[in-house]
Every structure is written in structure tokens, then in C-alpha cells.
Amino acid sequence: MTRLVFAFACISLFAARSYADHSSTTTQDQAKWIPLDAKAGAKGPQVSIVFGDLAKKAPIGFLFKTPPGFRPGPHTHSSDDYAVIVSGRMHNFPAGKDMGPALAPGERWHQIANEVHDNYCEPDAECVVYVYMPNGFDFKPAK
């Protein structure tokens, strides 16, 4: 089920616009993970780019992996984000509010740009989420 959900998420994004000049495949063993926090390294949140560039304000799709129990704190992004849970159970909720239900593989959220929100990965397993951001990736801690 998890691979099927991931495949459909990728297919739906690539059907609208091609981001590569050739076909390719990437196995789980070949995925390159980039730490988002240099101090935490591989023990903190990481991304594996599916298409796009983290440094550009342009469409990007990536896998976002967090350790069990991870919570970044209230924050915003300047782009909407569309997310599909691949593994684990993740919450996405307005900052300071109830976490609501944990989303399981195949479930998804849409987060509006510049809206303060938080996330939480349930403590029983790491979370992997496929994220598409049409206007590029950024992360701004909220006050």
C-alpha cells in the first residue's frame, strides 16, 4: 500500500509537468538523504529530493523523513504544501491547537502558505512524507 500511494503521488505530479529530460528509477537503497539540521545530522529531519532544487523558489517534490517523536515547533512556509504520508503516523495542525488525528500511510494534508502550523511524528516509528511545494521549500520558525 505504501509504495502504491507514493507511486500515485509521484505520477500525479509528473503528469502535469516533466521535470527531467530522461526516465529514471531510484531504489530505496539509492535514495540520498540530506539532513535539514546540520547539528542533528542523520538523527534529525532529512529530505530526499524527487525533483527540483531546495535552493530555488520553484516547484519541488521531496521525501521528508523524521525520527520518531519529532516535532519542529510552530513554523510557516512561503509556499502551499501538499503532503501524502508514506510511512509512520504524522500530525499536521494549527500551532497552539489540538493535534487532531494522526494521519496514516495514504492519508494527506494541504497546508496553506504562511499559515502558522506544527507537525508531530508519532513516537512508535519514523515518519516519511512525500511533499510537493509549488513555490519552493523554506522553513520559518514562528514566534
Image: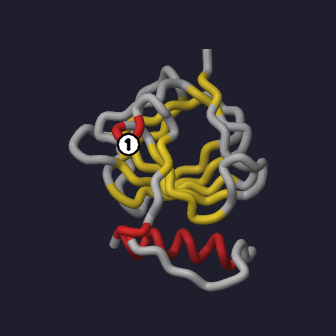
Q: Is residue 54 left or right of residue 117?
A: right
In front of the other: 92 or 143: 143
Q: Where in the figure is residue 76, as x and y percent of width and height?
A: 64, 32
Quadrant housing the C terminus = top right
- What amino acid type is highlighted by mark number 1? Ala
Q: Residue at x 56, y 59 (%)?
A: 49
Q: Where in the figure is residue 112, as x and y percent of width and height?
A: 67, 42
Instruction: Using the image, determine if residue 60 lies above or below residue 46.
Output: below
Q: Which residue is mark 1?
A: 42
Secondary structure under the numbered disc 1 in the rendered image: helix
Q: Quadrant of residue 61?
A: bottom right
Q: Residue at x 40, y 53 (%)?
A: 128
Q: Quadrant of residue 120?
A: top left
Q: Residue at x 71, y 46 (%)?
A: 55
Q: Is residue 38 left or right of residue 128?
A: right
Q: Residue furthest top?
A: 143
Q: Is residue 28 left or right of residue 136?
A: left
Instruction: Using the image, determine if residue 126 lies above or below residue 108.
Output: above
Q: Quadrant of residue 29?
A: bottom left
Q: Residue at x 44, y 29 (%)?
A: 39
